[in-house]
Amino acid sequence: MTDSPTPTGTALEQAAWRRLESVLDPELRRPVTELGMVASVTETAPGDLAVVVRLTVAGCPMRETITADVRQALLPLEDCTGVSVTLDVMTPQQRAALKEQLTAGRPANPFGTGSLTRVFAVASGKGGVGKSTVTANLACALAARGLSVGLVDADIHGFSIPGLLGTSARPTRVDEMILPPVAHTVKVISIGMFLDTDQPVAWRGPMLHRALEQFVTDVYWGDLDVLLVDLPPGTGDIAISAAQLLPGSELLVVTTPQQAAAQVAARAGQLSEQTGQQVAGVIENMAAMTLPDGTVLDLFGSGGGASVTQRLTEALGHPVDLLGSVPLDMALRQDGDEGTPVVLQHPESPAGAELRRIAASLAVRPRGLSGMKLPVTPKD
Ligand SMILES: Nc1ncnc2c1ncn2[C@@H]1O[C@H](COP(=O)(O)OP(=O)(O)OP(=O)(O)O)[C@@H](O)[C@H]1O
């Protein structure tokens, strides 16, 4: 937006405008100056700065963060003795201009054909194999590598991503545009963020499809390097909708080492034959853990990951890789319960290290059929 005043005025006011260029809106991840959010900067007395910030909507949940970030940016300025921040709200016209600025020239579906975003849909044959835990950790590990990452919790009946990322934030709406909350620098959206109660979601196919469509088209994702989609277990409506809405998406199949689990996981992977998706690889989770006395505990047996890759390689007629084997690890479970993913909280733990290794391999893998590399851009 261009209606922010041009930096003029006293030397301190001009220095303040320049510093405010480094303050990012917490949801849009763009400078507040560029978004037209700084209405004025006035040196009311020598060294005293009064800043008026326009929020996108009244009651913006990020008001305290923005106020603190503005103060933190300006207080260290030489000659600045005090900063007061007043919050105002954009007029409907200013909001419309902001929306236009953000969406102009972008396709309605930013992940349609030709999109540069690498999309991984994470599937499993059955529930409880750790698919959501793996997805949340891969998202954080990829973001920690400097990639701009989005995460859609499409496990609509069993959404658990907000808890795993420790966020209870609600998305902000700018007219019909939805701004995803940011947790551990990952932009995240989940049906759980739109529900008022713990009531089960009793939706059928068309509603599920519409919800996922909204997550794709109405959410402002900005320029993402990677989008991860946590699918519900199995091969139901959502998995098929996701394949339609995200035509370039590749499947990541999560299984436990148990043979019975591997059989159903392979079936979920074989869905790709019908949807035309690539299978990016298989991740084995809950593999054997080594106890402090050196004993190896393989609660779920072994070989499930290898067996899924073999089945998929045979069924699909091209090699499908086992990307890694994440061991059972108390730290992974505890960190998940606390909303602080293990890859960030205990990166050197057995599970944390393996998940980071898998994320690193995904970040540099050539893209599906086209052989494109991930565009590595600075975090926006
Ligand atoms: N490697 C692991 N070591 C220890 N605990 C794990 C591991 N992986 C997952 N868990 C735990 O297993 C439980 C199930 O994990 P999660 O919710 O991620 O499974 P899911 O496959 O997404 O299930 P659903 O699809 O039914 O939602 C969680 O309590 C999680 O902390």
Image (cartoon, grey):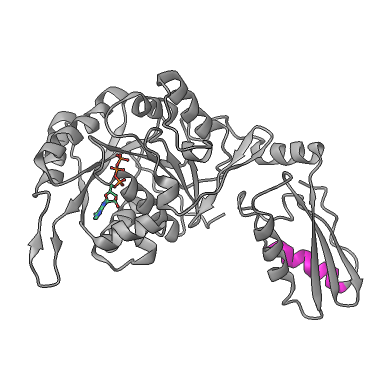
- How many numbered circles are shown? 0
Residue sitting nearer the eye, 141 or 86:
86
**In the shown orientation, is residue 183 left or right of residue 62?**
left
Q: With respect to residue 82, does 185 lie above or below?
A: above
Is residue 15 part of the magenta span, yes or no?
A: yes
Q: Quadrant of the C terminus?
A: bottom right
Q: Is residue 277 left or right of residue 79?
A: left
Please tell me in which quadrant of the rendered image residue 155 appears. top left
Residue at 60% x, 35% y is 106
Q: Please identify the quarter of the rendering in which residue 86 is found.
A: bottom right
Residue 181 is covered by the magenta coloring = no
Q: Is residue 52 left or right of residue 118?
A: right
- For the residue pair 198 and 209, the one nearer the viewer reads as 198
Residue at (83, 48) in percent of width and height:
3
Q: Position of residue 152 (x, y in %)?
A: 44, 40
Q: Is residue 276 above or below residue 360?
A: above
Side (left or right) of 289 relative to 208? left
Q: Measured from the top left, where is residue 320 in percent x and y?
A: 20, 40
Residue found 33% across the figure and 67% down from its top = 346
Q: Main secondary structure of the magenta part?
A: helix
- Residue 20 position, x and y percent, is 73, 63
Image coords of residue 43 (percent x, y): 89, 70
Q: Magenta region: which residues?
A: 11-22
